[in-house]
Amino acid sequence: MSLDHPLNSLGFAKPPAATRVVVAMSGGVDSSVVAAQLAEEGYDVVGVTLQLYDHGAALAKKGACCAGRDIHDARRVAEAMGFPHYVLDYENTFRAAVMDDFADAYLAGATPVPCIRCNERVKFKDLLQTARDLDADCMATGHYIQRKLGAEGPELHCATDAARDQSYFLFSTTAEQLDYLRFPLGHLASKAETRALAARYGLAVADKPDSQDICFVPNGNYAAVIEKLRPGAAEPGEIVDLAGHVLGTHRGVIHYTIGQRKGLGIGGLGDPLYVVRLDPDARRVVVGPKEALSTRVIPVREINWLGDAAFDSVAERHVMVKVRSTRAPRPAVIRPLSATEAEVELLAPEDGVSAGQACVFYAPEGSRILGGGWIWRGR
C-alpha cells in the first residue's frame, strides 16, 4: 500500500476495506457501538466474544458481561452489521489467570481488582494474540480511554468523560500493546452519545443496562465465590484492637475489607471502629479508630511504566496518583527502588489504602496516564 495514501481513522495508510480490525465484543452497548461504527466506515471487522466462565450459572444473572445472554447479543449485532463473529472458550484461562488469583489474594488478606487482571492477562494478552493470528492490523475495544500519538509514540490518556474514564483498570497496558490497540469511544463526551450511536445503527442493545458487578461475582457476594473456589477458606477467628485485645469473633477473614465499619458485630464499644488490618495467618481482623486508617507511604510493585524516560532514571517524580477506582487522583512523589518497584508518598494521607489495589500514576498536568503498579503491603 502506498505511503502516500492518507491515514484512515485507525491510523493506517490504506483504505478501511484493506484494514482488518478485531473488535472485542462483550455484548454490551459500548463494544457493540465500536464494532458497528467500524463496520459502517467500511473496515474489515471481525467480532470476537470470550466465554469466560460457566454461563449456565450466569444466565439467570443480569448486569454482568460475558454471560450467555451477552454472547447472544454480540452475535446479533454482528449479524445485523454483516461481519463475522466468533466465540472463544477461555474458561480455563480465565479461571487460572483471574478467578484463582482473586481467591488467593483475598485469602492472603488483600483486596484484589480482577477486572485489571482480566485486561492484563486475558483480553490484552491472549485475545490480542488471537487478533494477530487472524492477521488483524489492530484490536479495538469499547473502553473509555484514549490513545494519542506523542513524540515518543502512542500514549495512554484519560477519557474525555471523567465519569466514564477507565484508566484505573487499564494502567497495566504495555507500550507494545498500546501500539496495537484502539479505543474509538474515548473521545465521547458522555455515555448518552454512545447510546445515541447505538440507536442510529439500530442495535438491539441500545438501551441495555451497564454491567455493574464483577462478572463472576453474583450480587457482589465475594465471600461465596471464594468459598466455592477454595472450600474451607472461611475459617472463624478473633476480632482484636490495635493492642491485641480480643473484642469479638468473626466468621472468616474473607468477609472483611480494609476500611469496613458495618457488620463487625462489636457495637457498643464507644467510638466507631474500622477494619485497619487483616492477618490471615493468625485468622485475625484488626480494628481501630478512623485515624488509624490514614496512610502516606505506599509500597508498589509490578510497575508498568508508560512514561518517556526509563522509570528508574530519576530519584523521584512528582505525579498524581489514584489508589482506588472511585477516588480522584491526588498529588504524590514516586521514589523508584528498581525498574518495577517504588515507594509512593502521598502529600496528604489517604484512608483505607489496601494491599491488592492498584496505584495508578498520572501526569501532574493534562490527561496522560504514566502507568502504575500494585499495592503489595497494606497497613
Image (cartoon, rainbow, N blue to C red):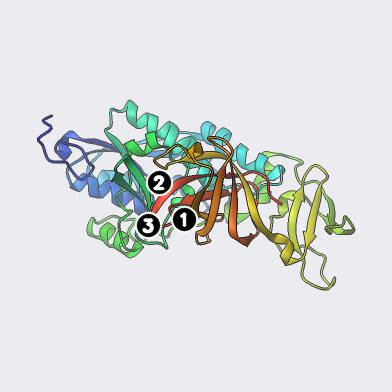
User: Residue at (80%, 42%) from the top-left corner?
Assistant: 281
Under mark 1, the amino acid is Ser
Residues under labels 1 and 2: Cα distance? 10 Å
172 or 42, which lies in front? 172
Q: Mark 2 — residue?
A: 26
Disc number placed over residue 366 in the picture, else none: 3
Residues under labels 1 and 3: Cα distance? 29 Å
Residues under labels 2 and 3: Cα distance? 30 Å
- On the picture, is 17 further left or further right than 198? left
Q: Where is residue 356 in the image (x, y as percent from the top left)?
A: 62, 46
Q: Is mark 2 on a helix, strand or loop?
A: loop
- Mark 1 and mark 3 lie on one chain; the one further toward the N terminus is 1
Q: Residues within 10 Å of mark 3 (few under 14, many from 20)?
A: few
The part of the image, by quadrant, that contains residue 134 is top left
User: Residue at (67%, 47%) from the top-left corner?
Assistant: 110
- Mark 1 and mark 2 lie on one chain; the one further toward the N terminus is 2
- For residue 94, above or below residue 35: above
Q: Is mark 3 on a helix, strand or loop?
A: loop
